[in-house]
Amino acid sequence: MDVSSAQKLWDPEPGWLNTASYGLPPRPAFEELQAALGDWRIGRTSWEPWGESTVRARAAFARLVGVHPDDVTIGSTVSQLLAPVAAALPAGTRVVAPDIEFTSNLFPWAVAPGVEVRTVPADRVADSVDASTDLVAFSLVQSATGAVADYDAIVSAARAHGALVVVDATQACGWLTFDAGRADAVVVGAYKWLMSPRGSAFAYLSPALRERLTPYAAGWSAAEDLHTSYYGLPLRVASTARRFDISPAWFSYVGTAPALELVEEIGVEAIGAHDVALANRFLAGLGLPPGDSAIVTVDVPGAEERLARAGVRAAIRAGRVRASFHVYSTEADVDTALEALTG
């Protein structure tokens, strides 16, 4: 399915340029969710079909980032998925992270007892990794600026010094292709570029890293066999990354599975090309050079009021416009925003 055909599966009001805050659901995902909510309202069915959505979603996410489903755990938020990694760090661990990193990939390290976090400019992360570094944490695409990290350079620097690599790909997964298996952990909140309900999130955890972690939040969803693990000991957690699962928010995953499957059907590479082309159309209209991201930030006086009058919804960060473009965005959306900002 090409992007043009796929766009018919969304129903956005014109002017939505804020996927970096939350993505809009494709119609198949929204309708599947509404059907499940209807069943819940009157008690039409048991919960097992909703639970199966987590199986579909996990498999689709694994395919999107190029890893095996056994290496993927599911949860609700990025920081929750990082908690077992942070809990396993011994006192004296030294972490390097960008100074503008979103706090979901900073606070877990900062609250860990005895862990030292050193922040550096986002474009200096690879150069700042040295023999004293134990873990490098960074976003593949920065929420604040849209800057795309040099994934290869950072991973190479970390490996050269024996440091772990933890990547927040929330602002990348769905439009930017990457190999999650090169990192030790990759976390993704699905409600942005994967256009899912808030409450679903994924983490790739490498087998070597998992050996160092304890599933402190283990419950029946972390069991090897869910349906024979409702009650009593002995402990019988899964041998795969599922041991770190928390009980899924059913309806979030009901909406997540079809959204991820549609992203896969369209193709991340095709979506990325569409998104970046629109971002560069926006930049060109403001007399700025092209970039490589679906997220751009620009400084335009009075931008918030101008965009609001035109019906354009974008984020404003410290007076700067943060515009983000996705599969349902159109050239007309871009041109409306440009007219508002330059007219």
Image (spheres, rainbow, N blue to C red):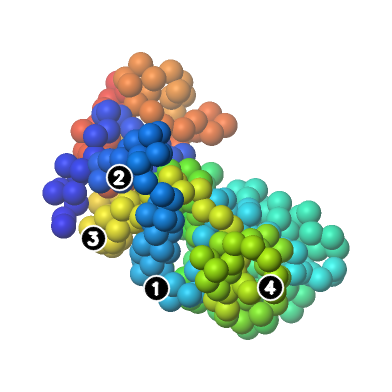
Residue 88 in view here: yes
Query: For the residue marked with disc 2, what is the amino acid?
Result: Glu
Query: Mark 4 sits on what residue?
Result: 235
Q: State which mark lies toward you, 4 or 1.
A: 4
**For residue 197, which quarter of the picture?**
top left
Q: Quadrant of the N terminus?
A: bottom left
User: Which SS class for mark 3?
Assistant: helix
Q: In the rendered structure, find residue 265 and report the number of the disc placed on it.
A: 3
Q: Is residue 92 left or right of residue 146?
A: right
Query: Mark 1 sits on what residue?
Result: 66
- Alpha carbon of mark 2 to alpha carbon of mark 1: how far? 26 Å
| x 49%, y 31%: residue | 316
Query: Mark 2 sits on what residue?
Result: 32
Query: For the residue marked with disc 4, what is the amino acid?
Result: Leu
Q: Earlier in the sequence, mark 4 or mark 1?
A: 1
Q: Is mark 2 in CB contact (under 8 Å) with mark 4? A: no
